[in-house]
Amino acid sequence: MNPKIIPNISVDCVVFGFNIRSKSLNVLLIERKLKSKDSNELIIDDFKLTGYHMFENETLDQSASRVMKELTGLDHLYKKQFKTYGSPNRLMNPKDIIWADSENFNLRTLTVAYYFLISTNDVNLENRKYNPQWFPILNLPELGFDHEQIIAEAHEDLKLKSLHEPLVFKLLPNKFTINELQNLYEAVLGIEIDNRNFRRKVIKKKYIIALNEKQVGVSKKPAQLYTFSMDIYKKADEKSYLINI
Amino acid sequence: MNPKIIPNISVDCVVFGFNIRSKSLNVLLIERKLKSKDSNELIIDDFKLTGYHMFENETLDQSASRVMKELTGLDHLYKKQFKTYGSPNRLMNPKDIIWADSENFNLRTLTVAYYFLISTNDVNLENRKYNPQWFPILNLPELGFDHEQIIAEAHEDLKLKSLHEPLVFKLLPNKFTINELQNLYEAVLGIEIDNRNFRRKVIKKKYIIALNEKQVGVSKKPAQLYTFSMDIYKKADEKSYLINI
DNA sequence: TCAAAAGTGTTCTTCATACACCCATGT
DNA sequence: ACATGGGTGTATGAAGAACACTTTTGA
């Protein structure tokens, strides 16, 4: 038996992936293509986020995880519900109307948006349904629906949260170098950071642990590897209430 | 013509009000009462947030503002959509089921939660429909549905945001004293702050402006009044990217 | 004159900031 | 040997943290 769909509620997933080599923060998108019935001409050819309708018997978090698993094959990723979009005219541009018509879905759909964090290293996108592709957040293609806005707001939330929670480690492999962490902060926040000051600050933290390991397979001086311990972080409970208004 | 209701989508409003005199952060609640059909005995007697179904032709923000206006008579208040609740069993305790039955509403309802910020000074709750009442956030009564959780998560979001945005001024009257601002921070964050250090820090900010006015009608030394200028705040654009992990 | 809250200074320590060169490694 | 990115130290100034008493006012 198929689960019953809730027709006017969907989830959309903004998947953020940090690429260590290109040092860029990326978003995972899928193609939205539609050919005209008569002329066989492409009348829609852009990209969109992955999403799907919610089922009757699942929570919002479960809906999001389900969509994500179908997209990447991965489970148990970090996810954050960050905003819900429900304007009656959020899907009112001509392409969106044609698309909704062809897919037979309700234009008065409310969508609950999540973002997911992952290291692009940890995903294999080959041979996946929907053919998902990474795009740098600073160089996104044309997007359908209100997905450009959704991505922008996800990014804002990610920035804010990154400043206070150890979120960014979800965007790195388990083992990482200090410079990779710095590149990540620079990509997420869109700022430049002084390397010496950054190292000093990071190395001082007890929950960032130097491993007895170095990078392998690099054609230069291999860097020291570190890991992040959530346990130690939680115990330390470094709630520094810096009122920063 | 009546607007058409979307039966499975609602908004709920957490109204935070700071009370200058009691120095406490409060939440606005309404009674949930139901009498048994036979015995005339109260079978439900607790409190809940205000909320209502969304209409077909409005945005989520409009729904929230509408509910809020009906509750307090006030318009154009600061509001923030912070989370959406959609678990299939979020309304599964016996009282909730009885209530839903009596009110004839769908238990599989997704609710989009907002919080509002206001100074209790600026609201007059007398003779309002629903008889709303303020409760200190540290001393809430028994709450129906999942509203205790919703309030807790609203408070968490408010705490986090208060550290980085000039949100708290929405909880004060236009003119306020330094000590009132300090009491507010203490109530919102649940911390104690050193008065001398706090004054020094606050007075240094250009967007906190000393007025040529003092408190009136107090039976002690009247305090200097200040106001917050959003314009100056925005221009200053003090985005100090203190990474605080 | 008293009660109540407003207002005020200093020291110490920590942390952010700015800045430029040598080092270790694989090729 | 060389190219590449890894790794290091110091000085200055700003701001946080700790701490107790005097002042002003209305009643």
Image (spheres, coloured by chain):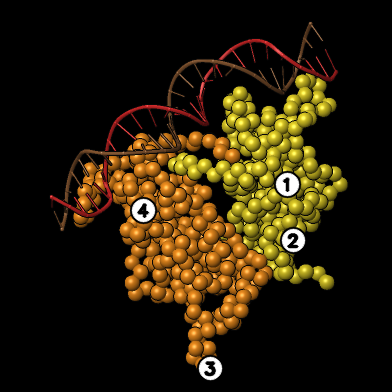
Chain colours: A orange, B yellow, C brown, D red
| Badge nearest the viewer, 2 or 4 | 4
Residue extending furthest bottom? Answer: A38
- Give SS at disc 1: strand
Circle on res. B103: 2
Discs 1 and 2 lie in a common subunit = yes
Q: CA distance from mark 2 to mark 4?
A: 49 Å
Q: Are marks 3 and 4 in contact (CB under 8 Å)?
A: no
Instruction: List the residue tagged with mark 4.
Output: A172
Q: Answer left or right for B241 relative to A95.
A: left
Location of residue B85 with respect to A163 vertically, above or below? below
Q: Amino acid at mark 3?
A: Asp
Q: CA distance from mark 3 to mark 2?
A: 51 Å
| Depth order, front residue of B133/B221 | B221
Circle on res. A38: 3
Q: Answer left or right for A44 relative to B223.
A: left
Q: Amino acid at mark 4?
A: Leu
- Give SS at disc 2: helix
Q: CA distance from mark 4 to mark 1?
A: 44 Å
| Badge nearest the viewer, 4 or 1 | 4
Quick one: label 1 or label 2, which is nearer the N terminus? Answer: 1
Circle on res. A45: none
Tell me if I can see residue A132 in this picture.
yes
Residue B112 image point, x, y percent: 64, 58
